[in-house]
Image: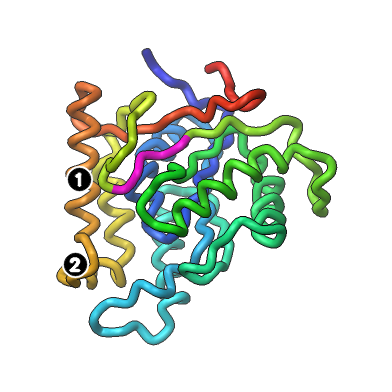
Amino acid sequence: MRLDFSDERVLAVVAHPDDAELLCAGTLARARDDGAAIAICVLCNGDKGQPAKPVKDLKKTRRNEMRAAAKLLTAELFFGDFSDGTLAVNESSRKKLITIFRKFRPTLVLAHSANDYHSDHRAASQLAEAVSWFSASTGHRTPAKPLKSPPALWWMDTVNATDFEPGFFVDVSDYVELKQQMLNCHRSQMARANDSDFTPIQELMQRQLEFRGSQARVAAAEAFQCHTAFQRATAW
């Protein structure tokens, strides 16, 4: 069975710079090569993850690192501009994300699992779920017009594949090197490899790719679940 992303518009909604690289960049690259338009929305600034040798303006540094990674993927990039640890589901955050949805106009959204380890990931999950519906509602007003219909929504794997039962896998064996190159753009996070409160993300990504790949009988895979709520599922 082959999944074809041609003519789709795929938006990854993630909490921090480097989350897309870890969890869905291979799928975005496959979609791009199928002819889809792709984009990443990074909701938080990554401004609290300081390495042992502090970075003077970590927000600016991480934003530039994310731009370099998105350029490798040739993905459009949006920023939510929330400080780490402050992301919450409220009228302001919903409106900001609705505006981004209506600007890019996705047909498919990739978002964090609701039970991922980080509170920003969980908040981003709730926001993406709510906004994937509200972005098509005429009652939620923004300068851009509502979407014609809510986009399909896929939950991404959790970090370290913890407490996540895949609904299906995407073969990303051809995109492992690209994912590694993108992750290497995040030098401020690479500098945290030996911190006691941090897991080296290159090793984490490779281990998870191989684990999910072994489950799917390929070299490397990314895992997802479909959001199947009433009027939300889409046939492919």
The mark nearer the N terminus, 1 or 2, is 2
Q: Which residue is mark 1?
A: 206
Q: Residue furthest top?
A: 1
| Residue 27 percent coordinates (x, y) | 39, 36
Q: Secondary structure at mark 2?
A: loop
Residue drawn at 24 percent across, 57 percent down: 201
| Residue 100 percent coordinates (x, y) | 66, 52
Is 167 situated left or right of 214 in this image? right
Is residue 157 found inside the magenta-colored segment of the image?
yes
Kindly report the distance in space between the C-alpha atoms of the residues bearing marks 1 and 2.
Answer: 15 Å
| Residue 8 percent coordinates (x, y) | 57, 30
Is 93 situated left or right of 117 in this image? right
Residue drawn at 23 percent across, 39 percent down: 209
For residue 185, above or below residue 14: below
Q: Which residue is mark 2?
A: 193
Magenta range is: 155-159
Is 94 situated left or right of 26 in this image? right
Residue type pointed to by label 2: Ala
Residue type pointed to by label 1: Gln
